[in-house]
Structures are given as C-alpha cells and as structure tokens.
Image (cartoon, rainbow, N blue to C red):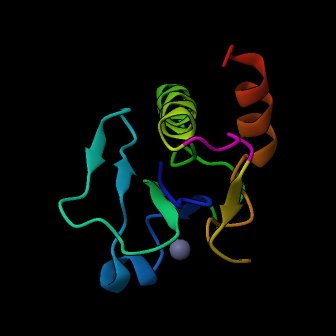
Amino acid sequence: MSDILGIVLHDSDCEEIRTAGYDFYVCRDGTVIPSHQFTADDYLHIVIEGHFGAPRTDLGVLHEQMFVLVKLIIKLAKAFDMVPHEIISHGDECPGPEFPWHELTVRIDRLPH
Ligand SMILES: [Zn+2]
C-alpha cells in the first residue's frame, strides 16, 4: 500500500516538469513514457503532450491520446488504491484552459473499474 493521494495533470508547456520531473508522459500518438526518475511526491504526475492555452486546434488531445490517458489513470488508481476521480490540475494555466476536462471525466465514468 502506498501513500499516493492522487494524480496531477500537466501539459507539455509546463515549466515545472522540466525541473521537478514527472512520472508518465502521454504522447500525442498514445505512447506512454514512464519517467526514469519518479517525482518524490504524494501525487503521481502525468504530462499530456500538447498545448491547451488556445481553443482546440490540431494540437489538442487526439482521440488515441485521450483513450490511453483514461486507461492509464484507471490502472494507476487501481494499483495505488485510489479513486480515479482524484485527478487535479497542476494550476490555473497547466494544463491550459482548453484542456478537455469534461471529456476526460465522462470517459473515466464510462469505463468499468
Ligand atoms: Zn504543470
């Protein structure tokens, strides 16, 4: 049993992940890259590759990326014995305001867990 409290989401514009690191990086094509150096934190940090500061463009979350993100969150929630809804944004600007939170939470609800 671990003391992980939840999951923090970042986008790839985040400055802090360059210094503080991250745990998983979800690429646009759906590839998940686990970090070699886990953040020593009470939270797991997941980076979504993309820029969400402006309204949806072709750089937004792609279908496959969102699918993989949802599966990753549910897997981690199981592994660390936490509620999959314990996902928080890093800050007001990270992920950017255009990140599709609604789509994410709806998809998490829809999957059996
Ligand atoms: Zn961030």
Looking at the rendered image, the quarter that the C terminus falls into is: top right
- The residue positioned farthest toward the left in the image shown: 36
Closer to the camera in the image, 72 or 12: 72
Q: Quadrant of residue 97?
A: bottom right
- The residue positioned farthest toward the top in the image shown: 112
Q: How many marks?
A: 0
Closer to the camera in the image, 95 or 52: 95
Where residue 78 appears, as percent x and y from the top left, is 55, 32
Where residue 79 appears, as percent x and y from the top left, is 47, 36
50 in the magenta segment = no
Residue at 51 percent of width and 49 percent of height: 59
Closer to the camera in the image, 84 or 67: 84
Main secondary-structure element of the magenta-colored stretch: loop
60 to the left or right of 86: left
Residue at 46 percent of width and 74 percent of height: 41
Q: Is residue 90 visible?
A: yes
Residue at 70 percent of width and 61 percent of height: 88
| Residue numbers of the magenta segment | 81-85
Where residue 103 appears, as percent x and y from the top left, is 76, 35
Where residue 42 appears, as percent x and y from the top left, is 52, 70
Q: Is residue 54 visible?
A: no
Closer to the camera in the image, 25 or 73: 73
